[in-house]
Amino acid sequence: MKVTVTVNGAEYVRDVEPRLLLIHLLRDELGLTGSHWGCDTSNCGACVVWLDETPVKSCTVLAVMADGRHVMTVEGLGSGTSLDPVQLGFAQCHGLQCGFCTPGMMLTARWLLNRNRDPSAAEVREAISGQICRCTGYENIVRAVLWAAKNGGTE
Amino acid sequence: MQVPAQVEYEKATSVEHAISLLARYGSAARVLAGGHSLIPMMKLRLAQPEVLIDINGITDLCYVNLTGAELRIGTLTRHVQLLESQIAGEHFAILHDAERVIADPIVRNWGTVGGSLCQADPSEDLSAAFAAMKSTMVIQGPDGRREVSAREFHTGPYETVVGPAELLTEITLPIRPGGGSGYQKVARRTGDWPVGAAGAAVWLTGDTIADAGIGLTAVGATHFAAAEAEEYLRGRTATEETLARAGEIAAENCRPVTDQRGPADYKRHLACELTTRALRLAVARAHGQAA
């Protein structure tokens, strides 16, 4: 069936099977491979993207459910040549090792900072508690988000 | 790679439209709300509906509001909306306690209250919370609406009284004087299903328990409730000994099973201890002595 989805501000129209998952629409149909496909069971959070105003796990959302909605992926963070403070924070604080969880972590961090300009470390941990860093680099992820809060905060 | 089987898809635009679609497709159809239980089950082929009726467009079903002496919750309300609803927390702290430990923040953004209840997982947190609060479920179908007590809603694991052409549309919770409530859960890790969990509500007259509600999940309690312990509490003074005894009675009357989350005797221990802790919290809140 035909779906119209706005991804990072650009409108896409595709003819998809109803069983197609949003993560596969983004990666395989639209070529936006920044969103990662991990556990397939909504546990790991590598596939987190924004659906309208909130982050969701896109391996557990059908592409047809995004019809008429706005999606933001990691490719939509920052603008052109300027990085989002969250991206700068991950660079400054060594917030990534292998990088597999990073897109999802950054999208959740952006959502958190938009709602809470000055989160505590505990609030950062709570926000990312549904996402797994396989390198177990959580300390630096938390530091990166707190750095972003201090150096630029909201978009 | 986990992929659901082929399926047809219909987008419902209103409750009436959803019911007419459900009536047309019968048991071949499943309602798709947040999909955070249904889609994983479809990937594993544990569920293979022929048609999905997507109700995410029925925004009329997203609300938490106060009408008279009742809190009303629309079933498409996302978990995060219930967690952030001030009026829900003010009158029913148990709902915020439970929502805070359901899955994780990202899942709570999209998963729905009604979806959780209709999935009817025997370890579901909200089923115990609504059983404790003696809530009412509002179900709509081709012949109009009917109301069912939370304790008559589930007919077994993954089964409810909602018929093939019906939709759960609202949960109502009566606000009664002297009330306090709380929820206590033990899980292996953040976001997991409970090893055991208990919700409690008390309605006090002075120090006397005029009425009590106890909900249990993941421990094989009939209708997610501990009716014998509630009966014991009614009319008694809310002392530490009384609450501890109610916990023991709750544990004696549930039937936990050993599984990968823990052995049956540990779950029975949790039923006792968590019931007592939830009651203690509910009493403190009824007295205005706990947040």
Image (cartoon, coloured by chain):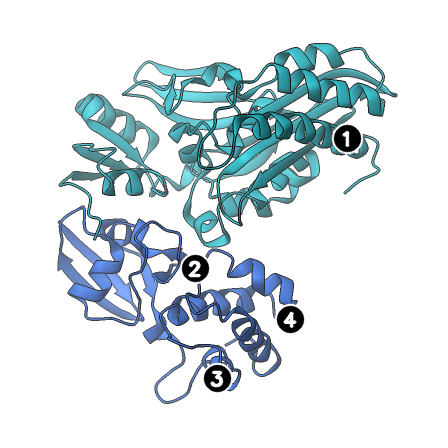
Chain colours: A blue, B cyan
- Percent from the top left, x then y, of residue A103? 38, 70
The amino acid at mark 3 is Leu
- Is residue B12 visible to the viewer in this orientation of the structure? no
Choose between B14 and B115: the one closer to the eye.
Answer: B115
Residue drawn at (52%, 15%), measured in percent from left and top? B222
Camera-nearest residue between A15 and B57: A15
Q: Which residue matches tag 3?
A: A88
Identify the subunit bearing mark 1.
B
Q: Is residue B180 left or right of residue A129?
A: right
Q: Say the numbered circle drawn on residue A118.
A: 4
* Residue at the disc numbered 1: B280
Q: Secondary structure at mark 1?
A: helix
Image mark 3: chain: A
Left or right: residue B18 versus residue B174 is left
Could you say where residue A130 lies in the image, as x and y percent from the top left?
A: 47, 55
The answer to whether residue B2 is visible is: yes
SS assignment at label 2: loop
Q: Quick check: do tags 4 and 2 share a chain? A: yes
Which residue type does callout 1 highlight? Answer: Arg
Do marks 1 and 4 share a subunit? no
Cβ atoms under marks 1 and 4 closer than 8 Å:
no
Disc 4 crowd rating (10 Å Cα; few below 14, some 14-19, many 20+) is some
Q: Relative to A13, is B255 on the left or the right?
A: right
Say the numbered circle drawn on residue A6. Answer: none
Query: Are discs 1 and 3 less than 8 Å apart at CB?
Result: no
Q: Is residue B160 above or below residue B10?
A: above
Query: What residue appears at the point 75 percent right and 14 percent down from the top-left corner?
Result: B233
Residues packed near mark 1 inside 10 Å, few (<14), some (14 to 19) or many (20 plus): many
> Mark 2 and mark 1 in contact (Cβ < 8 Å)?
no
* Residues at marks 4 and 2, CA–CA distance in whole angstroms: 20 Å
In front: mark 1 or mark 2? 1
